[in-house]
Amino acid sequence: MVRKPAASTISNGGYLQGSVNARLSSPGGKEPPGQEKVVLKRKISLLRGVSIIIGTIIGAGIFISPKGVLQNTGSVGLSLVVWTVCGVLSLFGALSYAELGTTIRKSGGHYTYILEVFGPLPAFVRVWVELLIIRPAATAVISLAFGRYLLEPFFIQCEIPELAVKLITAVGITMVMVLNSMSVSWSARIQIFLTFCKLTAILIIIVPGVMQLIKGQTQHFKDAFSGRDASIMGLPLAFYYGMYAYAGWFYLNFVTEEVENPEKTIPLAICISMAVVTVGYVLTNVAYFTTISAQELLLSKAVAVTFSERLLGNFSVAVPVFVALSCFGSMNGGVFAVSRLFYVASREGHLPEILSMIHIRKHTPVPAVIVLHPLTMIMLFSGDLYSLLNFLSFARWLFIGLAVAGLIYLRYKHPDMHRPFKVPLFIPALFSFTCLFMVALSLYSDPFSTGIGFTITLTGVPAYYLFIIWDKKPRWFRRMSDITTRTLQIILEVVPEEDCHKL
């Protein structure tokens, strides 16, 4: 059953905790004798926060095919400039989210900030598209990369069967869902381990690349800016590829209510993570060009594998395994964070009530985690996932740009709000302008894909009025909804937040 939306928590220039928001455990995590609150606990430390951001950002892209940037810039030098600028822009966006996350101390990320600033309709449209298309398709894409690279060492001499890839992928997706349903602590610990695996994989590429530079292998950097001229059509697509590779810096804001000391942890985790990722990405691309020419990179299906085969000999067999672990880390971090978006949207009355319930013993939002499983499986065994992501990539940056623009609005509308972390105004202004400019250019450079994505996004408007605003639904519908909710509660052993039980 979908409840009526809760009221906004921004009032009189300050942050107020609503009756359904931010219910966290008491100081020290202790409860009065005889009762135990069923809540999401603060278990995200600085190290875990850094691992969520880095572990989700670094997926398969930097290892497999950074040729999208090179293809749309036309030269080695300009591609490295785009990688650097995208890192700086992502840092600007992350710093803006650090201010939003410490000012509006609620989980949910983009959804929450749009809800607080622009109201329920655009917030619902955002979570509608995320739940039905973007997140299942994105999870399926990164999971397919996991399955393919996990199997690659076993199929060195032949093509990997597509069915085998999809079956292993399905197992991987199920493992991630089970892990995130069972324990917050264990999913965080595994995320830390996988983040170290990702950084190790990057170092395996960077260190030999630096050694190549020391040896004088700089032939591919001569006349670095010569080549095919970048077009007005190509540059926005290059930035799309670059910004997509950095996407993930916003995931810690999805779990704000579970972060220890969020006023310090969120900004610090964001700054550390973005510095590490930006330096790592740029140096990795530099390392590629010490061994692979621009033409060879454009022809390679997996740049990291081509690079390792030339420099690392037999050790190159380990690279696909590291790529698979990197993908698994992105899957784990993405599911962990986005499930909180669905949890908060349900708590605000924009998704079925069952999604805001928590397991009575494990204290995890089990329904919000597993709701992605059937949708992701449908995506996995259905059509062209990459086209779906292309259709809706503009929607992601449109709503992120709006969320950051909301920060500027709050500065003027509520100047007295408590802001533990505050960025110079030019940072959110530049970032939101860049996002909206990329969206506008995508309408010009690829009107067909963008138009389809825009149409899919607009389906959220009638859905909002049908499922949220219309309160005179038939009695049979309400009864069926209540029975379904109660049945799922019993099966999944979940209760509304803060229900007290002594089991």
Image (cartoon, rainbow, N blue to C red):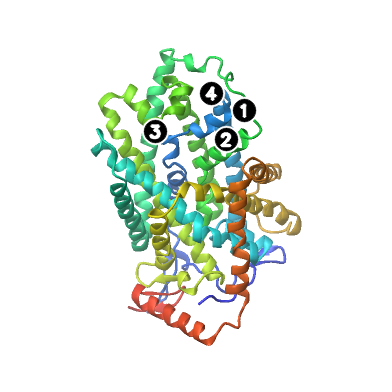
Give the secondary structure at mark 1: loop
Amino acid type of disc 3? Ala
Discs 2, 1 touching: Cβ within 8 Å: yes
Q: Which residue is pictured at 38% across the width and 49% down the height?
A: 143
| Residue 180 visible in the displayed image | yes
Give the secondary structure at mark 3: loop
Q: Is residue 155 left or right of residue 485?
A: left
Quadrant location of the C terminus in the rendered image: bottom left
Of the numbered discs 3 and 1, the one sitting upstream in the chain is 1
Label 2 sits on residue: 238
* Between 175 and 363, the one nearer to me in the picture: 175
Give the secondary structure at mark 2: helix
In the rendered image, residue 275, in percent from the top left (x then y), is placed at: 52, 37
Q: Residue furthest right?
A: 412
Discs 4, 3 touching: Cβ within 8 Å: no
* Mark linked to residue 76: 4
* Mark linked to residue 230: 1
Of the numbered discs 4 and 2, the one sitting upstream in the chain is 4
Give the secondary structure at mark 4: helix
Label 3 sits on residue: 302
Q: Which residue is pictured at 25% across the width and 26% down the height?
A: 314
In the rendered image, residue 347, in percent from the top left (x then y), is placed at: 53, 70
Q: CA distance from mark 4 to mark 3?
A: 18 Å
Amino acid type of disc 2? Ala
Q: Is residue 72 left or right of residue 309?
A: right
Dot 3 alpha-carbon crowd within 10 angstroms: few under 14, some 14 to 19, many 20 or more? some
Q: Residue furthest top?
A: 216
Q: CA distance from mark 3 to mark 1?
A: 24 Å
